[in-house]
Image (cartoon, rainbow, N blue to C red):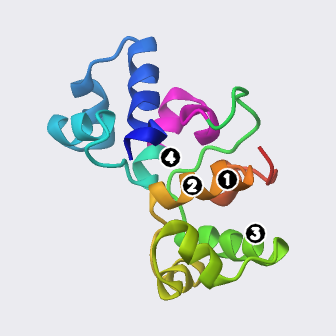
Amino acid sequence: MKNNMIGEQIKNMREYQDYKQTDIADILKVKQPTYWAWENDVRIIPLKHLNTLANFYNVSMNYLLGLSEKNNNYINLDKLDKKVIGKNLLQFRKDNNITQVKLAELLHTTHSVISAYESGKTMLLTAFAYQICKKYKISLDWLCGRTKNEKL
C-alpha cells in the first residue's frame, strides 16, 4: 500500500498541526504503535479512525488523504454507518454500469465481498475505498455519507 501514501498524508497533517503520535493515538483510542503502523503504511487506518481524524482536524476525508486539494463542504459524523456506505457504493456502481465482478477484479477481491459491503454487513476497507475514489474521481466523504457531492 506504500504507493497510495495514506500514511504519509496522515503523518503530514499531524506534523503540520504539531501533534505527537501519542497525542493522536490517544484521540483515536489506540496504542501509539498502532498509530505508528498506520503512518508508516505498515497497516492501513480503518475508515472509522480516518473519520475521527478528519473530524479532529476539521477537514474532509478527501483532503486528509490527498484526494482533493480543496477542503470542500462536509458533515462531521460521530460514527460512520456501514449501511450508508454500502448504499452509496451500490449507487455509484449502478450509476457507472460496473458489475460487482468488475469492481471485485479492480480491488483483487471477490464479488461476495462487494456484496457484503453493499448490503451493509461489512465495513468497506479503507484501501478499497481509496482505490475506488482515486480511480473513479468520486468523493470519499460522499461514499461515507459526509457530503451530498459525489464528485471530487
- Residue under pointer 4: 51
Which element type, helix, strand or loop, lies under badge 4?
A: helix
| The C terminus sits in image quarter | top right
Q: Earlier in the sequence, mark 4 or mark 3?
A: 4
Q: Which is more foreground, mark 4 or mark 1? A: 1
* Residue linked to disc 3: 92
CA–CA distance between discs 3 and 1?
13 Å
Tell me, yes or no, if residue 83 can be seen here.
no
Under mark 1, the amino acid is Lys
Q: What residue does disc 1 label?
A: 135
Classify residue 74 as left or right of residue 37.
right
Q: Which mark is residue 131?
A: 2
Q: Does the CB distance between marks 4 and 1 fall below 8 Å?
A: no
| Precedes in sequence: disc 4 or disc 1 | 4
Task: Give the secondary structure at mark 3.
Answer: helix
| Image point (54%, 79%), residue name | 114
Residue 151 magenta: no
Residue span colored magenta: 51-66
Q: Is residue 56 left or right of residue 132?
A: left
How far separated are the C-alphas under marks 4 and 1? 21 Å
Closer to viewer: mark 4 or mark 3 = 3
Residue 64 position (above or below residue 95): above
Q: For marks 4 and 3, give the CA distance.
A: 20 Å
Whether residues under marks 2 and 1 lie with C-beta atoms below 8 angstroms apart, the answer is yes
**Amino acid residing under circle 3:** Phe
Label 3 environment density (alpha carbons within 10 Å; few <14, some 14–19, many ≥20): some
Give the residue type that dot 4 points to. Answer: Asn
- Whole-angstrom CA distance, mark 4 to mark 2, is 17 Å
Circle nearer the viewer, 4 or 2 = 2
